[in-house]
Image: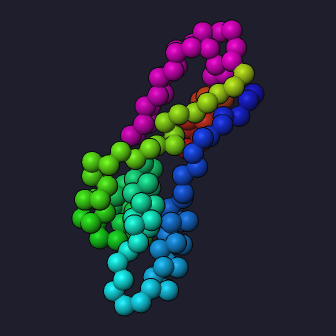
Amino acid sequence: MVPAKRKNVQPTLEAVQELFDRWRKDKRGRDPIPDALWEAAILLSTKHSINRISKQLRLNYNDLRARAKGRHVPDSRAFIEFAGLSNVHYTVEMERPGERMKVTGSCDVVELVREFWRR
């Protein structure tokens, strides 16, 4: 079986939390949160709820929601490239809370299912 190739690696909630912790330790007074940290928090919204992110990162829920609202955040899970196609034609539909995938074509179905459920 051929492993999936991921094009974009998304930061984890724990990694972003570490960045926020480091910034909070080094900041002076009431410095505003840097844009790069806000962007990292918004990117997490493709994988986690705004509520979870705001609690874990100790951010104001309404501020984070307002910044994330209307933003198109690229989802690194949206496109998975599979190599090693076979000659068998399938239609595969998978669904779980908040995610749905339908694939029609020739591919290694076992590896596709594993990658979908691994996340």
Looking at the rendering, the stretch of residues picked out in magenta corresponds to 85-110
What's the residue at 36%, 83% (across, down)?
Answer: 31
Q: Is residue 48 visible?
A: no
What x and y, as percent, mark residue 38?
Answer: 39, 65
In the image, taking residue 106 as reference, residue 21 lies left or right, namely: left
Q: How is the image coloured?
A: rainbow
* Up-down relation of residue 90 to residue 19 (above or below): above
In the image, taking residue 78 as reference, residue 29 lies left or right, namely: left
* Up-down relation of residue 38 to residue 75 (above or below): below
Give the farthest residue toward the bottom.
Answer: 29
How many numbered marks appear? 0
What's the residue at 50%, 62% (across, down)?
Answer: 13
| Image-quadrant location for residue 52 | bottom left
* Up-down relation of residue 113 to residue 77 (above or below): above
What's the residue at 52%, 15% (across, down)?
Answer: 104
What x and y, as percent, mark residue 62?
Answer: 24, 64
What x and y, as percent, mark residue 26?
Answer: 50, 86
Give the farthest residue toward the right.
Answer: 1
Where is the N terminus found, in terms of image quarters?
top right
What x and y, as percent, mark residue 75?
Answer: 46, 43
Asked whether 103 falls inside the magenta stretch, the response is yes
In the image, taking residue 72 as reference, residue 109 lies left or right, namely: right
Q: Is residue 29 visible?
A: yes
Where is the C terminus found, in terms of image quarters?
top right
* Up-down relation of residue 48 to residue 16 (above or below): above
Asked whether 39 falls inside the magenta stretch, the response is no
What's the residue at 54%, 57% (across, down)?
Answer: 11
In the image, taking residue 67 as reference, residue 6 lies left or right, namely: right
| Image-quadrant location for residue 90 | top right
